[in-house]
Image (spheres, rainbow, N blue to C red):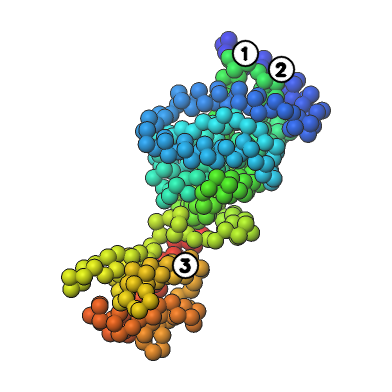
């Protein structure tokens, strides 16, 4: 047996003895005020192992983005107590650190003490800073609510020797230079990387992330749209950020309910690259006139009225269309007005087309109305398909 193996074996034996004492202490361990400091010590070893096994990014722009988002959310985590559905809600300030792993996996993980890692593949997958903030906030909750410690307690109760040793190392505050502790740091990293916390911990991380995001100034809908889109990619769910806790409709629904209960409007176009109505200015007969476009197609060009400019009408129309698209509208609810002069949604006017408006497009009001209704229905169909999970 090598010297390293002997050290590790002796460490396991000491850990088992210490864990017996921990079991006697019971839940008192969880409220130990120096728990965070002890977690951080072992987290340092896990971080050192990660740096050895993976290439960490030196892309200044991407690191700036990730760290600015992370620091805003960490400031909330370090000061606000959010009820824990799993783990402990007691605020334990950490010196959070954020890094990027240059690998294509759509993954992210954290190790105790506030070391957060996102993969290059995840940065390519998210569609906004709000979605990225959702993932980072989720990982911060894992650290802030001590999910690793609670997971190890569960595994240790099943006589898992590595879990016993890891838990004992955290609780005892073993020296970071101990050979056994270095080995355990590597094991800790592997557990975190594979995200094996379990569904209850994931629900807690989703819930806490929504609260953290809101208080940090990010749109919590970003977490929802990320989950919805990932749910459509089973090849990513099978390995990566949701390994061992499959992403299902119930989890997506749970996140959506929290957002709704908080009174936050679910406007997916604010957190994704979803198709939206936009205003663009065109030159018509030598004059600049705004038009409303959907997916590059002109659907409406308003003429000015006595009370409103063309620009005002175009903006109001685009905003109204986007509001409808974010309201779970169904295709059958979108109709052309029986008169042919506009589009109705849920039997209420969405778009009114005058003869002057149609003339600017070289069409009849009926033709403009049909083009607009068809374009809106096409977007509704696409987003229904995109959010199936």
| Along the viewing direction, whichever of 104 and 130 lies nearer the viewer | 130
CA distance for labels 2 and 1:
11 Å
Q: Viewed as shown, does residue 145 lie left or right of 339?
A: right
Q: Which residue is mark 2?
A: 14
Describe the element under mark 1 as helix, strand or loop: helix
Q: Which residue is mark 3?
A: 323
Q: Which residue is mark 1?
A: 7
Which residue shows up at 47% across the image and 70% down it? 324
The mark lying in front, picked from 3 and 2, is 3
- On the image, the x and y values in percent for residue 226 come to 49, 52
For label 3, count other residues whose C-alpha is less than 10 Å away and answer few (under 14), some (14-19) or many (20+). some
Describe the element under mark 2 as helix, strand or loop: helix
CA distance for labels 3 and 2:
62 Å
Residue 308 position by quadrant: bottom left
Q: Residue furthest front?
A: 306
- On the image, the x and y values in percent for residue 281 come to 27, 65
The relative height of residue 331 versus residue 167 in the rendered view (above or below) is: below
The relative height of residue 224 versus residue 56 in the rendered view (above or below) is: below
Residue 256 position by quadrant: bottom right
Which residue shows up at 38% across the image and 67% down it? 315
Q: Residue furthest right?
A: 24
């Amino acid at each position: 047996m090598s010297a390293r193996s002997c050290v590790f074996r002796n460490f396991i034996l000491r850990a088992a003895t210490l864990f017996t004492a921990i079991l006697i202490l019971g839940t008192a361990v969880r409220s130990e005020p120096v728990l965070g400091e002890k977690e951080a010590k072992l987290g340092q070893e896990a971080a050192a192992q990660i740096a050895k096994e993976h290439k960490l990014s030196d892309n200044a722009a991407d690191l700036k983005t990730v760290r600015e988002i992370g620091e805003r959310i960490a400031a909330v985590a370090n000061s606000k107590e959010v009820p824990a559905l799993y783990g402990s809600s007691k605020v334990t300030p950490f010196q959070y650190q954020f890094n990027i792993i240059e690998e294509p996996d759509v993954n992210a993980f954290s190790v105790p003490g506030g070391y957060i890692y996102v993969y290059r593949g995840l940065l390519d997958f998210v569609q906004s800073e709000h979605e990225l903030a959702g993932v980072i906030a989720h990982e911060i909750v894992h650290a802030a609510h001590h999910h690793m410690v609670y997971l190890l307690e569960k595994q240790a109760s099943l006589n898992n020797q590595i879990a016993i040793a890891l838990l004992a190392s955290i609780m005892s505050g073993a020296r970071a230079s101990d050979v056994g502790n270095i080995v355990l740091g590597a094991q800790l990293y592997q557990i975190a990387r594979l995200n094996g916390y379990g569904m209850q911990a994931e629900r807690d991380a989703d819930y806490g992330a929504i609260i953290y995001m809101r208080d940090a100034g990010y749109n919590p809908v970003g977490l929802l749209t990320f989950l919805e889109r990932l749910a459509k990619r089973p090849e990513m769910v099978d390995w990566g950020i949701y390994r061992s806790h499959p992403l299902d409709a119930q989890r997506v629904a749970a996140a959506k309910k929290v957002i709704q209960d908080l009174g936050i409007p679910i406007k997916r176009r604010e957190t994704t690259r979803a198709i939206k109505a936009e205003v663009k200015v065109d030159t018509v007969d030598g004059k600049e006139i705004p038009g409303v476009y959907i997916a590059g197609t002109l659907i409406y060009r308003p003429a000015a009225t006595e009370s409103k400019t063309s620009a005002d009408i175009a903006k109001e129309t685009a905003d109204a269309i986007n509001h409808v698209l974010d309201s779970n509208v169904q295709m059958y609810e979108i109709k052309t007005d029986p008169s042919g002069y506009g589009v109705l949604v849920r039997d209420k006017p969405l778009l009114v087309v005058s003869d002057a408006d149609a003339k600017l497009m070289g069409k009849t009001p009926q033709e403009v109305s049909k083009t607009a209704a068809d374009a809106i229905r096409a977007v509704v169909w696409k987003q229904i398909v995109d959010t199936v999970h």
